[in-house]
Amino acid sequence: MRLTEKYADRKSYLKAEDYMKEERILVLDFGGQYNQLIARRVREQKVYAEIKPYDRISVGQIKAEGYKGIIFTGGPNNVNDAGSPHYDPEILNIGIPVLGICYGAQLMAYLAGGRV
């Protein structure tokens, strides 16, 4: 097999840094202790992960940035507590896949109208 056939798609010629910029995941920080670890695991898959505090980025900004997916991280809270962090439910309707981990999974169910 010729080298040009093996790497026929353009992406195979790119360095990891190049295609890490093409695919970006937002790690939305809700105060959990594993935020950095989650982002590192995503980056190990050659996908750029960016950590942002949940209260510093709007749904509009998320859409404008062009993220391919969102990860809601864990945190020390419970969605039923009065002072627990929440997010705009519209996040679930913008057409970007969302993964919830621990508190993030609770929050997704809560935002979708479920009972936790």
Image (cartoon, rainbow, N blue to C red):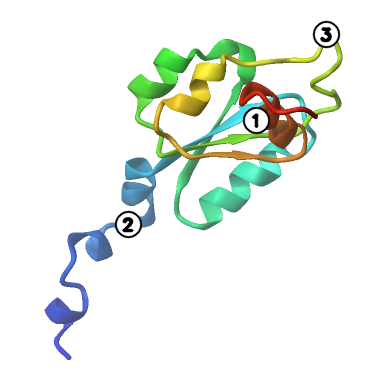
Q: Which residue is mark 2?
A: 15
Give the structural element (helix, strand or loop) at label 1. helix
Which quarter of the rendered picture does the N terminus lie within?
bottom left
Image quadrant assignment for residue 62: top left
**Pointer 1: residues within 10 angstroms few (<14), some, or many (20+)?**
many
In the displayed structure, would residue 55 be above or below residue 95? above
Judge from the rendering whether residue 108 lies leftward or rightward of residue 20; answer left or right: right
In the displayed structure, would residue 73 be above or below residue 13? above
1 or 3: tag closer to the N-terminus: 3
Alpha carbon separation for disc pair 1 and 3: 17 Å
Question: At which x and y percent is residue 110?
Answer: 70, 24
Give the structural element (helix, strand or loop) at label 3. loop
The mark closer to the camera, 1 or 2, is 1
Alpha carbon separation for disc pair 1 and 2: 35 Å
Q: Which residue is mark 1?
A: 108
For this rendering, which residue is in front, 58 or 36? 58
Judge from the rendering whether residue 73 lies leftward or rightward of residue 21; answer left or right: right
Alpha carbon separation for disc pair 2 and 3: 44 Å
Question: At which x and y percent is residue 37?
Answer: 69, 45
Question: At which x and y percent is residue 89?
Answer: 56, 18
**Pointer 3: residues within 10 angstroms few (<14), some, or many (20+)?**
few
Identify the residue at horizontal 77%, vertical 27% (top origin): 115
Identify the residue at horizontal 27%, vertical 57% (top origin): 14
Type of the residue with mark 1: Met
Identify the residue at horizontal 66%, vertical 26% (top origin): 29
Type of the residue with mark 3: Gly
1 or 2: tag closer to the N-terminus: 2
Identify the residue at horizontal 33%, vertical 50% (top origin): 19
